[in-house]
Image: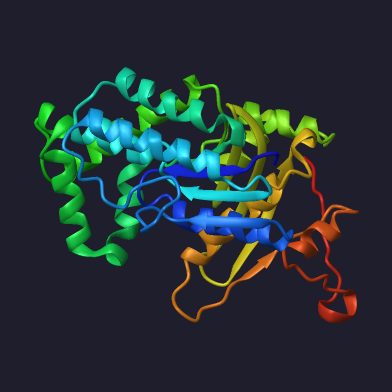
Amino acid sequence: MKTNLIIVEGLPGSGKSTTAAMIADELNRKNKKVVCVDEGVPEHPADYADYDFPDFETEREKILEKWKSFVQSAEKDAFYVFNCIFLQNPMCETMMRFGMSEEESRNYIAEIADIIKPLKPIIIYIDQPDVKSAIDSVLDERGNDWLNAVIDYHVSQGFGKQNNLCGYDGYIKCLDERRIRELNILRSLDIDYFTISQDMTVEEFVELFKSVGWNLPAREQMDLAIKNSTKSFVVRHKGTAAATISWLGDYGMHWFMKDFIVRREYQGQMIGTLLYRFSENFIKSTLKANQKVCIDLRAAKGKEPFYRSLGFLIMSENDIGSGMEKMVER
């Protein structure tokens, strides 16, 4: 990735903090100089911990100046990895607090995008269409105080007040609309971005198969393979499917990597590594404390070094017996 700035975006519960830390870790493994900063921390190089601005114009001036100062002082040989201050913070303020339109939000975010251009930024957006499930999954961890605070912030002012929203359901409606606007804005900007989601189409699956020279099964089989996978993730680069990974898992003892495809032009750019790490983090999230799970795969010939780099071990016939398969045909 030819960039000095990676920003991870997405709705609450989508895994932004974990993903940002994972990206920083991978860069560290490559002996890169990395500055990874979570949201809301004191002395953030490009943001404020306290957003108690009296009005939007004051906030806009302060935030844009902060971004300019960061770009001017950023070290040229460092990778900066930020969590959610490019879309989430501006959208929470413009849309949720001040009740501004999508176009007004876009114009403000476009100003930020123009300022950070010298750093060749990359936005990684974790798209979670099922907003309610994402929020429900983090409620136990974040607690009622967090939930009550975010509900109040979203429904008592700006967009929530304009649309007469209230309570938990109103909060979810706010996030649903925010997701739509954020993706619209991201597509409209002159900025490099990737999305990670779980909604791969059979047409994209076919194109990814073709891109690496694999023989195509019947289209119906490929459609069923997507629908019946336990979990599938797809990375898109500006809307084009760049990589996918699919799993069969019992949510207990075993997960089997079924398909893992990185389009040839995206190989060697950390896309495959980040997609694997992202899906491994999902598998870890299904475990309770001190539990372990076995991840199995069958490497394509010559790809063993890549999987070794991800922590996999080659199991010889003497270790576990021979791996075997049988193809049947009707």
In x, y percent, where is residue 290? Answer: 49, 81
Position of the C terminus by quadrant: top right
Residue 279 is at least partly visible in this image? no
Identified at 85% across, 76% down, the residue is 321
Comparing 97 with 62, the one in front is 62
Identified at 36% across, 28% down, the residue is 180
In x, y percent, where is residue 298? Answer: 79, 58
In x, y percent, where is residue 301? Answer: 90, 54
> Residue 223 lies in what quarter of the image?
top right
Residue 25 is at least partly visible in this image? yes
As drawn, 323 above or below 270? below
Task: Give the colour scheme shown.
Answer: rainbow
Taking the image as shown, residue 291 lies to the left or right of residue 57, namely right
Taking the image as shown, residue 40 lies to the left or right of residue 218, namely left
Identified at 28% across, 65% down, the residue is 140
As drawn, 239 above or below 119? above
Identified at 57% across, 49% down, the residue is 80
Comparing 307 with 319, the one in front is 307
> Residue 104 lies in what quarter of the image?
top left
Circle count: 0
